[in-house]
Image: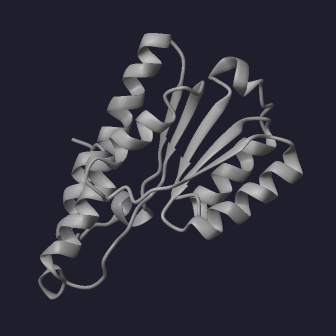
Amino acid sequence: MCEVTNLAATYGEYAIATGASSGIGEEFARHLSSVGLNVVLVARRIDRLQRLAGELSDAYDTHTIVLALDLLADGAVAELHRRVAHLDIGIVVVNAAMSTTGPLVNNSLSEELAVLRLDGAVPLETAHRFGRDFARRRRGAIILVASSLEAGQILCNGQTCATSQITTPRPS
């Protein structure tokens, strides 16, 4: 295992973890807190976020902020950016995602567009907003988490294929 340097000194005192109410986002939040970073937990399910915040604060003596936010809502990324503007954000983990199953034509168009937005446009907007801050400060890191389906699927359904083309470069 590699040695963890002082991430707060290298990047900033706070990390943001989207999709933090379960799964990979929750694990990112746990790890970031365990190495001494204060963490902003972002997801829709406030009860799960509050439970996790308590666990992290107790276990690692770090400050944890809960933001119940639906990243599919209009203006949600701008709202997230505004609400953390006063913090020394150094790492952003973009992990919130969703998917549909089955053939594209069997799913509703609104569901497919929501997947495309959350898995494509939201990461782009998040990286753009926070990336500008990081470039200005000359420090910061953005971790874009992609579904293994999006990264490795050969025959794609509509939104997964479109999102994959946006978020993962294809070999020539």
Query: Residue at left 11%, top 83%?
Result: 105
Query: Residue at left 88%, top 52%?
Result: 59
* Side (left or right) of 103 relative to 129: left
* Side (left or right) of 44 relative to 20: left
* Side (left or right) of 167 relative to 54: left
* Side (left or right) of 138 relative to 149: right
- Compared with 16, 145 (above or below) is below
* Residue 157 seen in the current view: no
Q: Position of residue 39 (x, y in %)?
A: 66, 42
Which quadrant holds the N terminus?
A: top right
Task: State how the image is colored.
Answer: one colour
Which quadrant holds the C terminus?
A: top left
Query: Residue at left 54%, top 26%?
Result: 86
Q: Position of residue 171 (x, y in %)?
A: 27, 43
Q: Quadrant of residue 106?
A: bottom left
- Compared with 53, 46 (above or below) is below
The answer to which of 126 and 70 lies nearer the viewer is: 70
* Residue 24 seen in the current view: yes
Q: Position of residue 153 (x, y in %)?
A: 32, 66
Query: Residue at left 73%, top 47%?
Result: 31
Q: How many marks?
A: 0
- Compared with 67, 159 (above or below) is below
Q: Position of residue 70 (x, y in %)?
A: 40, 60
The single residue placed furthest to the bottom in the displayed view is 106
- Compared with 1, 6 (above or below) is above
